Every structure is written in structure tokens, then in C-alpha cells.
Amino acid sequence: MASDGLISVESRFGVTETIDRLVEAITRAGLCVFARIDHAAGARDIGASLRPTELLIFGHPRGGTPLMQDQQLAGIDLPVKALAWEDARGKVRLSYNDAYWLAERHRLGDASRDAVAAIAAGMQKVIAAAAGADRS
């Protein structure tokens, strides 16, 4: 489990392409895309600069509902999200919340165990596909 609750994977692609690939991977997996937010565009709208940064919010009620049935406040962290961002050295990373960290944060019990494991495995798979780490 990530100590700060975040997992970051280096992407072989730019921010926009990484998020495009993530949308494709999630759609193939049968998940729903709820929102795509371009934070850099928002910064430009107010005359500020920000390195490329895009957030994708996605999921499926099958994954999140059991967590909220266990501890309803878990809904503050659902649906899941991933942030593609370019660091100061020009490296692109894809970051997301560790499902096991979320389980600990919300004190989820046995009722959520299978859903948490499925979310963790699913996230790892779609993130790897988006970042080009799956190499398959």
C-alpha cells in the first residue's frame, strides 16, 4: 500500500494521449467516464500557467456501491479518479488513489474486501494500458 495513498506510474505518452488511452481502456472494461477535467485549460482561462494536467473521473456502481454500503462516507472518494500530469522535468505520470489506502481511510470491513481487491486490480490494469506499461 502506498504510504500517502497515491500510486504514480510513468507514462510513455503525453498527458492528453495518456488520458485518451485511459478512456479507451476504461470503456473496454465496461466502466463509465463521468468527467474529464483539463486543469491546465482552467489555468489559462484565468491567465495563469500550469503544466499539462488532466483529471479523469470514472467507475461503475458495481465497484463503488459495496464500499458505500459498508461505510457511506467512502462516497467522498468515489467514483475513482486518475490524474495525468507533467512534472518539472517533462516526465508524464498517471496517479491515482490506492484502493487499499481508501479501504483503510474509511475503515472498510469484510463486506468490502472483494470490491476493494477488484478495484485495485482493475485500476492497475487500466492504468498500465494507458501509460504504455502493459507492453502487450
Image: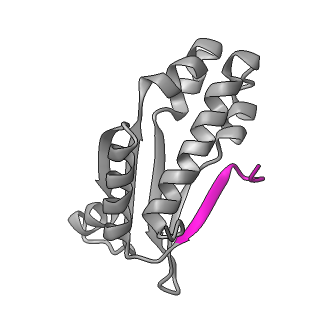
Q: How many badges with numbers are in the image?
A: 0
In-image side of 103 versus 25 (left or right): right
**Colouring scheme, one of rainbow, by chain, secondary structure, one colour:** one colour
Q: Residue furthest bottom?
A: 89
Left or right position of 90 against 115 = left
Residue 123 inside the magenta-drawn segment: no
As drawn, which residue projects farthest toward the left? 45
Of residues 34 and 114, the one nearer the viewer is 114
- In the rendered image, residue 128, in percent from the top left (x then y), is placed at 52, 61
Residue in the picture at 54% in, 47% down = 123
| Residue that protrudes farthest toward the top in the picture | 69
x and y, in percent, of residue 11 in the image = 49, 72
Q: Position of residue 101 (x, y in %)?
A: 71, 41
Location of residue 85 by image quarter: bottom left
Query: Could you say which quadrant of the image residue 69 lies in?
Result: top right
Q: Position of residue 30 (x, y in %)?
A: 36, 37
Nearer to the camera, 25 or 36: 25
Q: Is residue 83 left or right of residue 24?
A: right
Q: Is residue 32 left or right of residue 68?
A: left
* Residue range corresponding to the magenta coloring: 1-10
40, above or below 118, in the image: below
Residue 6: in magenta span: yes
Q: Residue at x 37, y 70 (%)?
A: 15
Query: Please, is residue 32 above or below residue 107 in the view?
Result: below
Residue located at (31% from left, 72% from top)? 48
Write the residue at 69% across / 49% down: 5
* 106 in relation to 125, above or below: above
